[in-house]
């Protein structure tokens, strides 16, 4: 476990904090990051020695020492970011306006809000290209992940109206649908697909499984189209959202899908790929929930939940995360040399099963351990409400951004 230095580097109140012990990791505070929350983070493939972070309309590459390699203004609010080879792809968004100038984007952002993808050179920060993800109503990009093998990126999010990426368009069936797209390293949009039904649906995460196969996860409300199949709500007499996870073949065919949730509103924190083609998905659930046939009861007002699905869609393991109050998971990822380490970030109120109590209204926790089952939950206390604003996990390590009055960023190697 790598938490000794992490706790030392997280002072109460969200200030800077001491450097963690040598050999464990490193941290950055507001003196380097500024005052605004970090919205996206990606580890540079250099042995966890530097990161690309986004906040406001800025994208920066920052080294372990705090030295700034480059900074780039992308014109609109910068969010999630992914790295493939020497390209960092950043999702930007904001109200559609001719006054918002996104570098290399033809025209303005389209939608309220609209979105776009901006590709930056990892070494210099120079803009290589941009492609719009605009809509006649609104569009949000929630996930950017490398598609593997230097092949480009997978992008996921949600939209209403008609969404256009490159020369491709899709139209939502209801108030909001989810989408997934494949974008090559030159900005070409290979394909664009939607999921959803008459109500509110969204894609929260997407990940490559290799060989062109991919998985996505998100939420759906009521019956929803998914490929050539349909998702069915677990409690069909409510309008509460459930969580879904689905795997697609390289030719676009749906291989399988699974759902979890109950009669109350559930959320999806994302998903990640594990060794051998398995996938893990995490979220927050309330009351009695069904995880692909396994029944759980949240211990308090809400709990986090993790489910690991084998390549044949069977549930390999599933467990709740939290105590007897209001708890949940906001971000997840898997990494390590064997892709078997699960990193969870979330919040808790009250006390954890270990007896640790939150100091404020909400405190942040992290959990790092084997993906086979529950890891040790380590609280990160703060004197004011705190939240996880970004998390990334790779084979080498992970980086997590927190915000409590001011931002902090913590990087650890496996």
Image (cartoon, grey):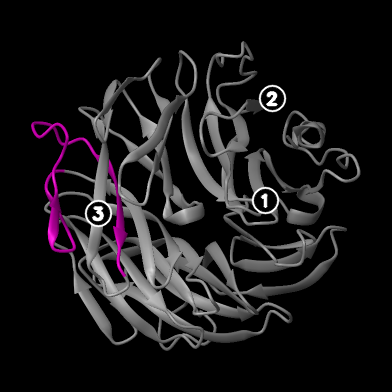
Which one is in front in this view, the residue at disc 1 or the one at disc 3?
3
For mark 3, what is the residue? Answer: 256
* Residue 85 in the figure: left or right of residue 309: right
Residue 221: % across, % down: 19, 44
Q: Is residue 364 above or below residue 149?
A: above
For mark 1, what is the residue? Answer: 399
Which one is in front in this view, the residue at disc 2 or the one at disc 1?
1
Residue at the farthest right position:
22
Residue 118: % across, % down: 52, 77
Q: Is residue 389 above or below residue 62?
A: above
The Cα atoms of the two marked residues, 1 and 3, are separated by: 31 Å
Q: Tell me which segment is drawn in magenta.
A: 222-249
Q: Is residue 383 above or below residue 116?
A: above
Dividing the picture into quadrants, the one containing residue 156 is bottom left
Instruction: Give 149 or 71, whichever is nearer the viewer.
Output: 149
Residue 237 is inside the magenta segment: yes
Q: Are marks 1 and 3 in contact (CB under 8 Å)?
A: no
Which one is in front in this view, the residue at disc 3 or the one at disc 2?
3
Image disc number at residue 106: none
The Cα atoms of the two marked residues, 3 and 2, are separated by: 45 Å
For mark 2, what is the residue? Answer: 383
**SS type, badge 2:** loop
Instruction: Give 148 or 353, whichever is nearer the viewer.
Output: 148
Dividing the picture into quadrants, the one containing residue 24 is top right
């Amino acid at each position: 476990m790598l938490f000794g230095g992490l706790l030392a580097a997280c002072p109460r109140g969200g200030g800077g904090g001491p450097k963690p012990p040598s050999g464990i990791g490193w941290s950055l505070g507001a003196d380097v990051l500024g005052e605004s929350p970090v919205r996206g983070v990606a580890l540079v493939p250099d042995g966890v020695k530097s990161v690309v972070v986004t906040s406001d309309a800025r994208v920066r590459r920052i080294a372990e020492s705090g030295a700034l390699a480059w900074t780039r203004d992308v014109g609109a609010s910068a969010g999630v970011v992914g790295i493939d080879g020497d390209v960092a792809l950043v999702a930007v968004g904001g109200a559609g306006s001719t006054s918002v100038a996104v570098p290399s984007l033809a025209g303005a952002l389209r939608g309220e809000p609209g979105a776009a993808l901006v590709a930056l050179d990892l070494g210099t920060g120079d803009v290589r290209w941009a492609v719009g993800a605009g809509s006649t109503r609104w569009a949000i990009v929630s996930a950017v992940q490398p598609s593997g093998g230097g092949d480009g990126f997978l992008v996921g999010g949600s939209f209403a109206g008609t969404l256009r990426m490159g020369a491709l368009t899709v139209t939502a069936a209801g108030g909001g649908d989810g989408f997934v797209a494949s974008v090559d390293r030159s900005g070409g949009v290979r394909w664009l697909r939607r999921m959803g039904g008459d109500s509110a649906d969204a894609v929260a995460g997407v990940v490559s499984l290799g060989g062109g196969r991919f998985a996505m996860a998100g939420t759906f409300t009521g019956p929803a189209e998914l490929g050539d199949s349909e998702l069915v709500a677990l409690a069909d007499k409510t309008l509460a959202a459930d969580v879904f996870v689905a795997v697609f073949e390289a030719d676009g065919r749906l291989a399988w899908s699974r759902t979890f949730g109950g009669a109350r509103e559930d959320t999806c924190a994302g998903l990640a790929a594990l060794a051998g083609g398995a996938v893990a998905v995490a979220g927050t659930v309330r009351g009695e929930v069904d995880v692909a046939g396994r029944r759980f009861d949240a211990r308090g007002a809400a709990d986090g939940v993790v489910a690991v699905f084998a390549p044949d869609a069977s549930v390999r393991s599933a467990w709740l995360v939290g105590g007897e109050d209001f708890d949940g998971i906001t971000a997840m990822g898997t990494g390590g040399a064997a892709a078997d380490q699960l990193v969870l970030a979330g919040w808790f109120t009250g006390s954890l099963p270990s007896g640790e109590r939150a100091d404020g209204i909400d405190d942040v926790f992290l959990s790092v351990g084997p993906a086979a089952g529950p890891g040790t939950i380590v609280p990160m206390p703060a004197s004011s409400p705190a939240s996880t604003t970004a998390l990334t996990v790779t084979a080498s390590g992970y980086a997590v951004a927190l915000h409590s009055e001011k931002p902090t960023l913590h990087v650890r190697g496996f």
